[in-house]
DNA sequence: TCCGGCACCTGTACGC
DNA sequence: TGCGTACAGGTGCCGG
């Protein structure tokens, strides 16, 4: 499941291979892949032909190709989206949703997405950010991330700390896996009310998040299966370093207590019952 | 306006 | 073997 470290790993690979190249051909194989592009598939591909990729950028889990004339090709990988750089002659995978060929030849870019939660769209760039994601907050690795402003908005919320971390309009790039990992590092229960978090605890939580993101980036991201791969089709290795996610019944790496898995927000949360006890007045 | 719940999707694992 | 069900979860939309 691509979160910030996985998307950043992919962004770096795309930037290395695609900046400066001009799109010669584009094709969409499934309308759902461009459902957020208002003009439909024909408009999407037609407006891409002849455009040159100037940069590959990211905010949270969104990434985009900055094109000529302040236009961006915006992408979200959803649950299972992949960008792959392969030779045009290589066989098409089952879930190929779109492909882009370049005027200078191979490799071509393919967008593959099994569960179709991901998608592509064109959007005008306003102040270097696609207009359609202006509501997405800066992520914690972004120089624009303002810790004091985050703390103010965080404590104004009437919700629990994990719900807040997953709210991309408050802080972007955090998904279920890294939320659980950061909460474990900061010794916080997911249902701790944000209003009860002190400034010092908030700093500790953000430091934990930064640390887990950086460690995951060094490992090339987290892969549980073949659904997350970098642009060369290779998996990341951070799953071997996870402290709580997916470790129900196994000993906490800090205190040895068995990790528990609990349903929360229609998904699973993992925590150490000793290091992350239920708070006095939880916000479930 | 803010918050929580749910639909959207497909492959895999598991029980019967 | 084959069928049904649960599960994985990011985003946007809707209702309270």
Image (cartoon, coloured by chain):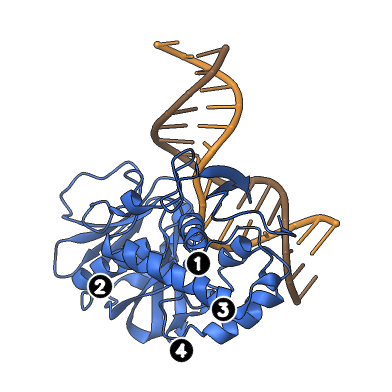
Chain colours: A blue, B brown, C orange
Q: Is residue A162 above or below residue A256?
A: below
Q: Residue furthest bottom?
A: A127
Write down the residue under mark 2. Answer: A15
- The residue closer to the viewer here, A54 or A43, is A54
* A32, A276: nearer the viewer: A276
- The quadrant holding residue A119 is bottom left
Q: Nearer the viewer, residue A232 or A261?
A: A261
Residue at 44 percent of width and 60 percent of height: A41
Answer left or right for A88 relative to A192: left
Q: Answer few, some or many: residues within 10 Å of disc 1's Cα (few below 14, many 20 plus, some between 14 and 19).
A: few
Rendered residue at 18%/70% (across/down):
A103
Circle 4 residue: A127
**Quadrant (top left, top right, bottom left, bottom right) of the C terminus of chain A:** bottom right
Mark 2, Cα crowd under 10 Å, few <14 / some 14-19 / many 20+, is some
Residue tagged by mark 1? A39
Residues marked 1 and 2, same chain: yes
Mark 3 against mark 1, which lies toward the viewer?
3
The subunit letter for the residue under badge 1 reads: A
Q: Residue furthest front?
A: A255
The residues tagged by marks 3 and 2 sit, at their Cα atoms, a distance apart of 37 Å
Q: CA distance from mark 3 to mark 1?
A: 48 Å
Residue tagged 3: A200
Q: Secondary structure at mark 2?
A: helix
Marks 4 and 2 sit apart, C-alpha to C-alpha, by 20 Å
Q: Disc 3 or disc 4, which is closer to the eye?
A: 3
- Label 3, label 4: how far apart the Cα atoms are: 33 Å
- How far across and down, in percent of the image, does residue A159 sit? 70, 65
Q: Chain of mark 4?
A: A
**Residue name at image x 41 percent, y 51 percent:** A253
Mark 1 or mark 4, which has the lower sequence index?
A: 1
């Amino acid at each position: 499941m691509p979160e910030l470290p996985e998307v950043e790993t992919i962004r770096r690979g795309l930037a290395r291979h695609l900046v400066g190249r001009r799109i010669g051909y584009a094709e969409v194989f499934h309308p759902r892949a461009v459902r957020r592009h208002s003009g439909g598939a024909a408009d999407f591909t037609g407006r891409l032909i002849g455009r040159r990729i100037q940069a590959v950028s990211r905010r949270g889990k969104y990434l985009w190709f900055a094109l000529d004339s302040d236009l961006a090709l915006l992408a979200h990988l959803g649950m299972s989206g992949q960008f792959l750089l392969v030779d045009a002659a290589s066989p098409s995978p089952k879930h190929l949703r779109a492909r882009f060929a370049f005027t200078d030849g191979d490799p071509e870019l393919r967008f593959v997405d099994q569960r179709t939660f991901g998608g592509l769209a064109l959007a005008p760039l306003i102040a270097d950010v696609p207009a359609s994601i202006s509501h997405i907050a800066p992520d914690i690795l972004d120089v624009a991330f303002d810790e004091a402003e985050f703390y103010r908005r965080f404590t104004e919320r009437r919700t629990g700390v994990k719900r807040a971390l997953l709210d991309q309009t408050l802080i972007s790039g955090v998904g279920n896996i890294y939320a659980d990992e950061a909460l474990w590092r900061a010794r916080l229960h997911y249902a701790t009310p944000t209003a009860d978090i002190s400034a010092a605890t908030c700093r500790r939580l953000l430091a934990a998040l930064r640390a887990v993101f950086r460690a995951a980036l060094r490992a090339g991201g987290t892969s549980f299966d073949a659904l997350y791969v970098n642009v060369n089709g290779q998996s990341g290795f951070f799953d071997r370093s996870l402290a709580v996610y997916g470790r129900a019944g196994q000993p906490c790496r800090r205190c040895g207590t068995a990790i528990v898995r609990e349903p929360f927000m229609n998904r699973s949360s993992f925590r150490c019952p000793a290091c992350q006890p239920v708070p006095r007045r939880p916000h479930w």
